[in-house]
Amino acid sequence: MYSIEKTLYGFKIVFEAFIKSEEMRNWVKDSEKALSSMPRAFGVLVDARELEPLPLDSQTILKKGQVLYSLKGMERSALVFNNDVIKMQFLDPAHKSAIYKVKRYINSTEDPKWEEAALSWIIDSVDPLAEK
């Protein structure tokens, strides 16, 4: 399951449970629609705390979605996770695209103020990695 919510800073995307390739394709289509009305610069908070590890085909589609957000003007994003497998599944595609420079990864089990850290990065460019 996923949701895409427009916010003052851009988008909050929530990924939960087990996402098969068809649902991930739907996320990309819904993202294309949502991105069509966005200004050139925006931020994205991805909440993947309740996401189960993705199958390989869903990971491939995720990469396409990540590139789409980057091409449409994503300036900064933060991935919030609580499972290192999920981090790696998002990290690998990000390493192969322009997203890696603008994305931060926050483990919610290690940082109880994960939302504050994520929004500080997205809105004010305060790097959560620099604070530690």
Image (spheres, rainbow, N blue to C red):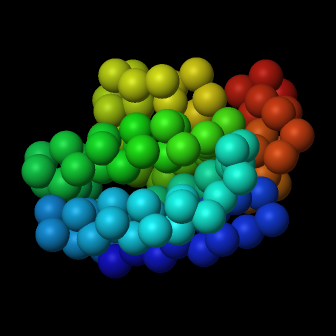
Q: Quadrant of residue 41?
A: top right
Residue toward you, 47 or 31 = 31
Q: Quadrant of residue 31?
A: bottom left
Residue 98 horizontal side relative to residue 97, left or right? right
15 versus 74 height, above or below? below
Residue 127 horizontal side relative to residue 77, left or right? right
Pinpoint residue 8: horizontal percent, then vertical percent.
80, 65
Pinpoint residue 16: horizontal percent, then vertical percent.
38, 72
Q: Quadrant of the C terminus?
A: top right
Residue found at x 34% / y 60%: 28
Residue found at x 84% / y 33%: 126
Q: Is residue 37 visible?
A: yes
Q: Quadrant of residue 102?
A: top right
Pinpoint residue 127: horizontal percent, then vertical percent.
77, 30
Residue 11 horizontal side relative to residue 92, left or right? right
Residue 20 horizontal side relative to residue 77, left or right? left
Residue found at x 34% / y 77%: 1
41 versus 131 height, above or below? below
Residue found at x 88% / y 40%: 124
Residue toward you, 30 or 20 = 30
Pinpoint residue 119: horizontal percent, then vertical percent.
78, 52
